[in-house]
Image (cartoon, rainbow, N blue to C red):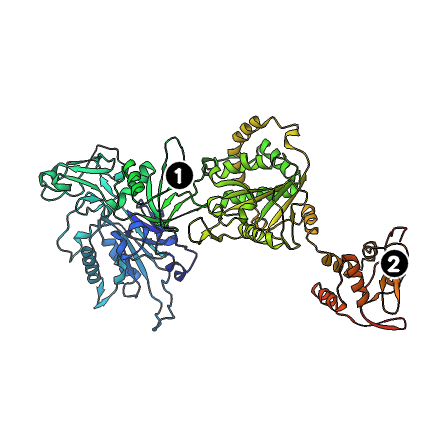
Amino acid sequence: MYLSTCSNYDASQPKEYNHKRVAAGWDFREYPWEEEQIITLCTARGVSGNKFDNGKRSKDHWLGTYAIMLDFDNGVVTTDYLLENQDRWEFDSYVFSSQNHQKTKSGALVEEQACDRLRVLIPLEEPIKDAAHLEAVKHALVDQFTLDGESALDQSCLDQSRYFAHGTTAVSSFVEGQGAMDWTTIPGIKDKPRSSTMSPSASVDEHTFRLESTIKDENENMVPLVDLEPDTAVYCPVCGDAPYRSNTTQRNAYYFLNDEGLPAIYCHSCKSREMGVSGDGIYTLHPDDIMKYKYKKDEVVVFIDTLNSQFLGGCVEPGQTEFVVRPLNAGTHVTQFCKSHKIPIPEVFPRARYEMKFHSDHVINFDGGYVNKYIAPAVLRTPVPTGHTPQCPPTINKILRHVTAGDRQILEHLVNNLAHLVQTREKMIVSYLFQGVEGTGKGFLFDQIISPMFGRNYCAQTDQDAFGNQFNSFLTENVFVLVNEVSGDFVTTKRKNLHTIEKMKTAITDTRVQIEEKGQDRYNGLNQCSFIFATNRRHGLILAEDDRRFNVAPRQEQKIQDMPWWQGYETMVTIVESELQEFVWYLKQYDVDEAQTVEVMNNEPKRMLQSLSKTGADVFFERVQAGDLEWILNNIPKSGEKTVIEYSDHSLTFHTLEDTLMKSNKIPQKTLCALYNLINKKDLSVEMYGRLAQEHGMPLPKTIRLGKLVDWGIAIDWQKPANLDEDN
């Protein structure tokens, strides 16, 4: 039998959840009439006896009804009555209960009491492909199941767009061995339509057929038409068993490819009756399906990119091995492209967004509205062999260890993120900074491991100037980027560099960004680009204390070519190439820590960079609040006994200041202001200093007593210096 099931249906969710998600995603296929198989379909899946064009469930996309699902939900038909009738039927059937069987249904205008709510799945011998016939069957069955003047059957169960949520096995009765129902024998059905040698999806519109057609071959099996070999004998889809044929048991047509390389059917009988194209007995592929067929067979397509209203053509160009898409100027170039690839120019070209769908292996999905910029390399698509034992290849492992300077923690973090990227193809929202002298292998890692793993056409090396450029379309064209010689202050940058830094931050974390191409309007593009940053500088980046973007590896001071295991560039390229598939399988089997993929490490190399982010004010107030008297005294510019602080009524030398601070935990606001100005070479007034202090979390000043003096200040628990210089 044939049934449709929905990939969007979730049996663990309530009906309301699924009703919003089953408008599309319907897959039509053949199933054996076996008890376990049928029970599973009816009680664990959302099913429909209808076939839908392009998997879209609606009346307009109805292609035929292949199975009947009777729905009794008002209690008129009881379990005993239905099972007694089932015993008398001369066709296979499965009776089962719905989710609301013997349940009270509340919430409606009138509460429905508990009763038997049942369904019956019945396979059909031949599909109902005419809406008028389906309506006739519906009325006949409604009449058949009207008891004592009350209809027992839910009439909507035979609607062209109807589907059924999964039921239960509270009632479960399976009958086999009787064969499918011949719906034309249902009492009340008149004018039995002739049977067809082609499925409803292949119904001939004047003299064309559809790409998804199935047709009866010489062995009387229904097979996909496009899977047939050219010059295969078949039964004509139009007259194969028509009553006007004297012998309907003989094949009378054959499938072939015409001069344009497109599928066609020639029928002797139709030619004798002047049917088909120009009465010559030939039926051709529907124009709407020609483009699909050409791509399926020849990997050629022409479409309009809805992002910029531009014609694009896709093919495998001479001398190349990969499918590429390039712009076509409307008019001459489109015409030449179509003629070159023997594509009939359609009246209406397909329209789609040409964008990066990193997560998908589908190149063209017009139903989904896109043509994919990303074509995954074979090394990424190849599945892990059954029983494979995961292990990181030795040479690649050594390269990873060297670039991460032997830091096990940062290496494991990197591998975890790479594994997550391989398994999900979702962009990393954290990045990595590799530091080291020139020649530590950062470029080799990217060029020979990362790039071939995700596709060389989608991985690029650049510098940070690319982010300052007006045009940023590289974010939509790559899935991995190595940014060389990065530098910048990610905390308090000068205005000149601020724009670039902000763009870098956005590129690392955001998946939807404003894309601007030369000569094109801005649009919201999909950013699926992950980043690695590299620098030969010792302090390439200055990072904020709360940075959530960068994982920082220790600085590597040894060149990779100086390592004892390095065998020369060309040899290493060959070795890594031989290990790459094993490495991808290792990542595919890696037990990913999901939480770690969005976290950054707070390790020593990062803390060193973060320390550079602190301003003089940050450090001063941090040390004051910590009571770090040693830091205060060591950072005051001093020279012997010279005055360091001058007041209107007295002055303090370095030594008297030290003595004063060590003997008291209270300090005047004016003294703190003087210390701040001395250490940071500023000239703030006490009032301006007070505002700055509050911004840095200092306590508000209040009245304090210093011996006989009363002043305005704060209390500080100064820590006694461990070792001051003897000069102090």
> Amino acid type of disc 2?
Phe
Query: From this viewpoint, is residue 345 visible?
Result: yes
Q: Residue at x 62, y 50 (%)?
A: 600
* Residue at the spot of label 1: 324
Q: Nearer the viewer, residue 83 or 591?
A: 591
Q: Residue at x 55, y 29 (%)?
A: 573
Q: Which residue is labeled 2 in the image?
A: 654
Q: Quadrant of the C terminus?
A: bottom right
Q: Residue 548 vs residue 300: left or right?
A: right
Left or right: residue 420 compared with residue 344: right
| Position in image of residue 249 (x %, y %) | 14, 38
Assess disc 2: are there few (<14), some (14-19) or many (≥20) residues with their C-alpha within 10 Å of its C-alpha.
many
Callout 1 secondary element: strand
Above or below, 454 relative to 700 = above
Q: Position of residue 118 (x, y in %)?
A: 31, 60
Within 10 angstroms of label 1, few (less than 14), some, or many (20 or more) residues?
some
Q: x, y percentage for residue 188? A: 15, 58
Looking at the rendered structure, the kind of residue marked 1 is Val
Q: In this picture, is 688 found above or below 297? A: below
Q: Could you say where residue 713 lies in the image, as x and y percent from the top left?
A: 80, 69
Tag in front: 1 or 2: 2
For this view, does 203 lie left or right of residue 350?
A: left
Label 2 secondary element: helix
- The residues bearing labels 1 and 2 have C-alpha atoms spaced at a distance of 74 Å
The circle on residue 538 is: none
Name which of mark 1 and mark 2 comes first in the sequence: 1
